[in-house]
Every structure is written in C-alpha cells, then in structure tokens.
Image (cartoon, rainbow, N blue to C red):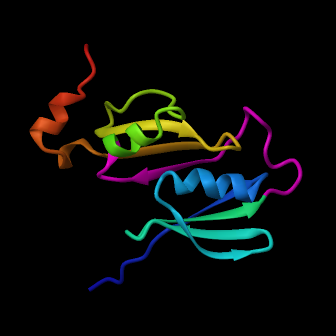
Amino acid sequence: MAQRHTVTAILPCSNLDASEAFYARLGFKPDAAYDNYRILSDGKGGEIHLTAAVGGWLVRLHNPFGIYIYSEDVDELAASLGDLLLGTPEEKSWGMYEFALSDPDGTLVRVGWPSAMKTPDERCFHTPPT
C-alpha cells in the first residue's frame, strides 16, 4: 500500500498574531510557535504554517498567495465568518461548493467541499440562479 502524504502551505504574514487570530476563526489552533514561525492545525489533518514576511514579499492588494481549505462545514464556517466573506457559498462550475475571503495580508482563502460529496438536499439549497 502506498504511504499517504500531505502538502502544507507556508504563508508569509506581516503580523503573525493577526494571522493566527484570523485562522483560528477557520478552526485552526496553534500547535507550535517560534520567533518568526507558527504551526496551526484544525485537528482533522489540516495544517497551515505562518512565517514572518520578508520585506517586499507582500504588497497590499497584490498578494499572489492563496490556499484552499477543504471542509464539509462550508455553510457553518460561512455563517461564522459573515463579516469577512467576499461572497456567499455557491456551487462552482468546477464541481465545488465554496466561498472565498482574504486573510489580513490579502491572501486568497477559499473554503469548499466537492459538490458530488454533498447530499441532494444540500446541493439544491444553494444552487445559484441561471
């Protein structure tokens, strides 16, 4: 059997405390903290690493970084983050039910779950009009 592996995003941050607080709202708690580095996990296998940004890495409103968080709890998270959302959760043509928001440094954060893995009742509740 092939060994399973994971990939973890390392996000540059201008303020580690502000970023840690933001990701806590998405269910990520600190596992380890160092001078310029934080490791956060959600207890379900998701992990995000935060690192102090080097000068010039982050340009406000031009941040090229992004992450995708897979979560079955799309609606619950969206409801708890209402003030931060860039739009409401919706079915996307690429087969995901998702929403987007930006972290304190403008990193695009998408939260979603494959549409095919949701029940028919869940899928039809949020289907956008055509």
Q: Is residue 118 left or right of residue 52?
A: left
Q: Is residue 27 left or right of residue 113?
A: right
Q: Position of residue 35 (x, y in %)?
A: 80, 73
Tell me: residue 1, above or below residue 97.
below
Residue 126, picture quadrant: top left
Residue 74, picture quadrant: top left
Q: Residue at x 73, y 32 (%)?
A: 61
Tell me: residue 81, above or below residue 25.
above
Q: Residue at x 28, y 39 (%)?
A: 95
Q: Single out the residue that lies furthest toward the right.
A: 55
Q: Single out the residue that lies furthest toward the top.
A: 130
Q: Residue at x 60, y 50 (%)?
A: 22
Q: Position of residue 112 (x, y in %)?
A: 37, 45
Q: Position of residue 5 (x, y in %)?
A: 42, 76
Residue 71 is inside the magenta segment: yes
Residue 93, picture quadrant: top left
Image quadrant where one finds the C terminus: top left
Tell me: residue 1, above or below residue 118.
below
Q: Is residue 42 left or right of residue 20?
A: left
Tell me: residue 8, above or below residue 96.
below
| Depth order, front residue of 84/86 | 84
Exactly how many numbered labels are in the figure? 0
- Give the magenta-colored segment's residue range: 53-74
